[in-house]
Amino acid sequence: MRSVPAVLAAGLAAVVLLPVSAQAVSDQTHARAGWTRSGTVTLFSATAAEQGQFADRQGNWHTVVLSVGEAGFSGVAADWTCPDGVQPSFADSGSEWTCTPESIRRLASVTDDDGVPMIRVQTKQKIRRLVVRGPVTVTDEADRVTSGSVLLRGRAVGDRTRAWVYSEDGQTRTVRTVRTQTHARGKVLGVRFRAPKWHVSSSDLVTVKTYTRASAWLLPY
């Protein structure tokens, strides 16, 4: 599994780890205890690569990198020409390419008139499934901007762990849930990717929910 960015909150002092078998805690349960959800962040990333010729694309390898996190949605779709026996490296930074880039298109969420991203991120079935979909802007290496759409689906079949983190003043707590053994598939700019035709890998599926409380909270011991 690939790692995903960690969410770091200033002043967090106490961590309570729950057993894997612990049941999901609803917002209503938090509310009854005096907590109100103030934010939610979903962390997930997927990479996909396929060797072959596409009718409307250059190169003999094609890659996709998609991620959602604290900064929202981002993605890259690229086409490469690689020598025999060589695959494009997702670590390529431009200094030493393992393959020749034919096109690199960077994807970002379209925003509405109020500046709100139109990419929607949803988790389902107690955070076992993820759906990311919506319109994107597409910027190529010449800074030409066009439009397109993205669909990313994630599914976790592994274990679940959950950590509760309390602030020092007891007014904030963060619940971080991690699902392992994930699978991803999707559609980017009209091209579908899924295993086994594509080589697909994905990170753990992580959700971070933040709750605030008006009154003091005594940490359990």
Image (spheres, rainbow, N blue to C red):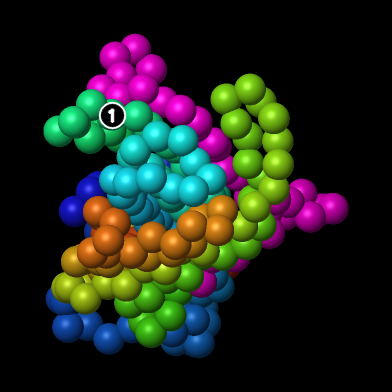
Residue 80 visible? yes
Magenta stretch holds residue 118: yes
Vertical comparison of 35 with 67: above or below: below
Residue 25 visible? no
At a point 25% along the width and 47% down the height, the residue shown is 3
* Picture coordinates of residue 55, whole percent (x, y): 49, 48
At a point 34% along the width and 38% down the height, the residue shown is 60
Q: In the figure, is residue 161 to the left or right of 167?
A: left
Numbered range of the magenta stretch? 93-122
- Which amino acid type is shown beneath numbered disc 1? Cys
Magenta stretch holds residue 167: no
Q: How many marks?
A: 1
At a point 17% along the width and 83% down the height, the residue shown is 21
Residue 185: quarter of image: bottom left
Q: In the figure, is residue 95 to the left or right of 134?
A: left
Residue 36: quarter of image: bottom right
Q: Residues within 10 Å of mark 1 (few under 14, many from 20)?
A: some
At a point 22% along the width and 35% down the height, the residue shown is 87
Q: In the figure, is residue 84 to the left or right of 99?
A: left
Camera-side residue of 3 and 140:
140
The residue at the far top in this view is 95
Camera-side residue of 65 and 1:
65
Camera-side residue of 40 and 171:
40
Secondary structure at badge 1 equals loop
Vertical comparison of 67 with 120: above or below: above
Quadrant of the rendering where the C terminus is positioned: bottom left
Which residue is under mark 1?
82
Q: In the figure, is residue 190 to the left or right of 45?
A: right
